Image (cartoon, rainbow, N blue to C red):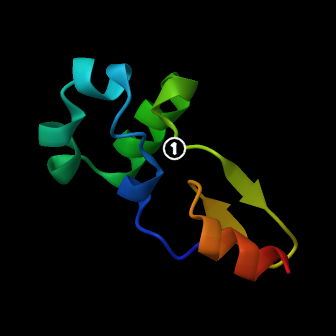
Amino acid sequence: MSGLPLKKFFNTSGLVYKDLGLKDKLPTMSDAEQYDVLASDGMLVKRPVLVGDDFMLLGFKEEEWAATLK
């Protein structure tokens, strides 16, 4: 729905992301593997996530949120 690549859903500044060394692993992981890793720990998911009927916002970018939620 977002049109974003799956890697954009990872919280790259989180400790779990760093502890798992995902910076180096993600480029070679399949989508299925990435989904499994994201589902394994909520701290890996970039937040906030807002899903509406016809939009999806990931991470807080004030201008994007303001324009979408007008």
The percent position of residue 55, horizontal first and vertical second, equals 75, 75
The percent position of residue 35, horizontal first and vertical second, equals 47, 43
Q: Is residue 26 visible?
A: yes
The percent position of residue 39, horizontal first and vertical second, equals 54, 32
Q: Secondary structure at mark 1?
A: loop
Q: Residue at x 36, y 20 (%)?
A: 16
- Residues packed near mark 1 inside 10 Å, few (<14), some (14 to 19) or many (20 plus): some
In the image, taking residue 37 as reference, residue 70 lies left or right, namely right
Q: Quadrant of residue 17?
A: top left
The C terminus - image quarter? bottom right
The N terminus - image quarter? bottom right
> Nearest the camera: 67 or 5?
67
Q: Which residue is mark 1?
A: 46
Q: Quadrant of residue 23?
A: top left
Q: Quadrant of residue 53?
A: bottom right
In the image, taking residue 10 as reference, residue 47 lies left or right, namely right
Q: Is residue 62 above or below residue 59?
A: below
> Nearest the camera: 16 or 40?
16
Q: Residue at x 46, y 32 (%)?
A: 44
> Nearest the camera: 66 or 14?
66
Disc 1 residue type (three-letter): Lys
